[in-house]
Amino acid sequence: MQRHPYLRALPAAAAIVTTAVTVTAAPASGAGAARPTSVTVAPTSRAPVSAQDRAWLREAHQANLAEIDVGGLARKKGTTPEVRSVGRMLVTDHTAFDGKVTRLAERLGVSLPKTPTPDDAAVADRLQKASGKAFDQEFLSAMAGGHEKVITDTRTQISQGSSARVIALAKKALPELRKHLAMVRKAQTSG
């Protein structure tokens, strides 16, 4: 029985293909002819996940954890409507964003820390103890500095990352982070 030329080349092609491809070939017609056969070749590799990609996912997750925590404090302890509004926004937006970060990290096999950074935990501890206008000022100052750092890290990820998926997530996050920083700065000037 003679093999179809496409089927002879299939093993070599499977080693090269990086996206799913279906190849259908019909054997020669005649008495021994069978129905067409299909072979699906699954992807053989993922886009690389660099140290930069892994670091950004971890840092973004830790920043989300911290901002959800202190945003909750601002919702409860803020003395102005602006501070409470910033707190609500941080809890809502960073909870949603962290869901995206954790799902992508899981798909890419990147393990994430379970707690904020020690520096962020120290800020949360200070805010837990603060009250009144001192709370508002410390909260807004910490959020301004934190968002400036995360924006810088996110821009670095966009320009230096390797994984298209991680870069795409960073690109989606950047306008939201800038919006957060603008709201924090507006609250700083109104109070």
Image: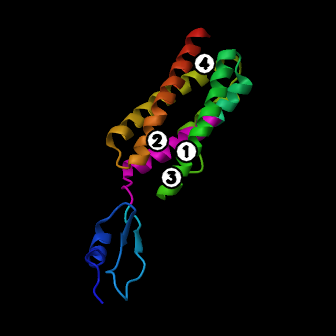
Disc 4 residue crowd, few under 14, some 14–19, many 20+, Cα 10 Å = some
Mark 2 to mark 4: distance in Å?
31 Å
Camera-side mark, 2 or 4: 2
First-in-chain label (2 vs 1): 1
Disc 1 residue crowd, few under 14, some 14–19, many 20+, Cα 10 Å = some
Residue 56 belongs to magenta span: yes
Note whether 59 is above or below 20 in the view shown.
above
First-in-chain label (4 vs 3): 3
- Mark 1 and mark 3 in contact? Answer it, CB < 8 Å: no
Question: What residue lies at 43% left-to-right and 50% top-to-bottom?
Answer: 54
**Amino acid type, callout 1:** Lys
Q: Secondary structure at mark 3?
A: helix
Q: Quadrant of the N terminus?
A: bottom left
Identify the residue position indicated by label 1 in the image.
Answer: 100
Disc 3 residue crowd, few under 14, some 14–19, many 20+, Cα 10 Å = many
First-in-chain label (1 vs 3): 1
